[in-house]
Every structure is written in C-alpha cells, then in structure tokens.
Image (tube, rainbow, N blue to C red):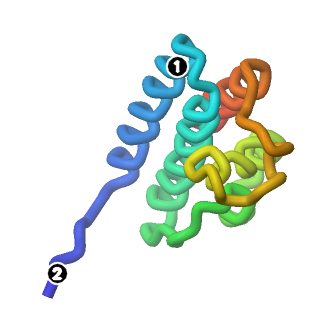
Amino acid sequence: MKKAINLKYKDWLFFAGEDILVAKLAMGRGIYNQVCFHSQQVAEKSLKAFIKARQGLIPRVHNLIELFKLCSKISEKITFLKESCEYLNKFYAPTRYPDAFPGSLADRLPNEKEAGKALECSLLVI
C-alpha cells in the first residue's frame, strides 16, 4: 500500500516558482507554446497552494476557472485574478499535445504577444 505524501502549500509554490523560471527561459528562446503552458502551470500550482494553505485538501483538477471559483469562496480578495485565470486556462492542453483540441488556439501555436500576456498573467497569480 502506498503511503500518502504530505505536501505543504510551500511545496506547491516552489514548483510554481520553477515554472516561472522555465516560462521566462522559453520566452527568451521564442518557444511561446511552452511559455503559455508553464504560465498556466504557475497559476494552477499557485491556486492549489492557496487552497492547501487554507483548507488542506487540493482538488485534482487542472481547470483554472474551477480552481479560481474554489479560491474565491475562501477569500473574495482574489477576484482581481479572474481574467488572468480565464486567459491562462485555454493553454493547458493545446500547448502540450499537438492533437489536443483542434481549433482551440485558432489552429496554431501561441505567438509572442500571447506568450507575453500569459507570462504577465502568471506573475499576477503567484
């Protein structure tokens, strides 16, 4: 029987911090789909850290809108993050898999402008 790992909210923030570093490196190299993916991951892990710190149990979801809703029930002070979460949410699957959701990113990879916005959004959430 596997023993449960008891992660703390700081563990989630540590990984979010690494994702920011990777997103910035990818931005510098022009790998915009990875900037968007890692920016989404920053938000996901940061929201999960917020939930973990206040409630202990983290839901097994990747949808930032769902995570945002859970967080906003805990504290209304985070409502300013809604637009950032909505923007980043669209990058989870299409930036990871070439056949994820045809048409979800207008049949192309994110460009520099979209990646820059994704990185800005992730820095607001962490």
Most foreground residue, 116 or 111:
111
The answer to whether 49 appears left or right of 105 in the picture is left
Q: Dividing the image into 4 quarters, which one contains the N terminus?
A: bottom left
* Residue 32 position (above or below residue 9): above
Badge 1 element: helix
Query: Extreme bottom residue here?
Result: 1
Task: Determine the residue positioned at 53% across, 60% down.
Answer: 51
Badge 2 element: loop
Query: Extreme top residue here?
Result: 28
Q: Earlier in the sequence, mark 1 or mark 2?
A: 2
State which quadrant residue 117 falls in: top right
The answer to whether 11 appears left or right of 32 in the picture is left
* Residue 75 position (above or below residue 70): above
Residue 40 screen position, x and y as percent: 61, 43
Residue type at numbered disc 1: Lys
Residue 98 screen position, x and y as percent: 62, 50
Task: Determine the residue positioned at 74% across, 50% down.
Answer: 90
Evaluate whether residue 79 shows in this view. Answer: no
Q: Which of marks 1 and 2 is in front?
A: 1
Most foreground residue, 51 or 90:
90
Task: Determine the residue positioned at 68% across, 46% down.
Answer: 91
Instruction: Please give the label number shown on residue 121.
Output: none
Most foreground residue, 6 or 40:
40
Task: Determine the residue positioned at 51% across, 22% down.
Answer: 26
Instruction: Please give the label number shown on residue 24.
Output: 1
Residue type at numbered disc 2: Lys
Label 1, residues with CA under 10 Å away: few <14, some 14-19, many ≥20: many
State which quadrant residue 124 falls in: top right
Q: Dividing the image into 4 quarters, which one contains the C terminus?
A: top right
Instruction: Please give the label number shown on residue 2.
Output: 2
Most foreground residue, 40 or 13:
40
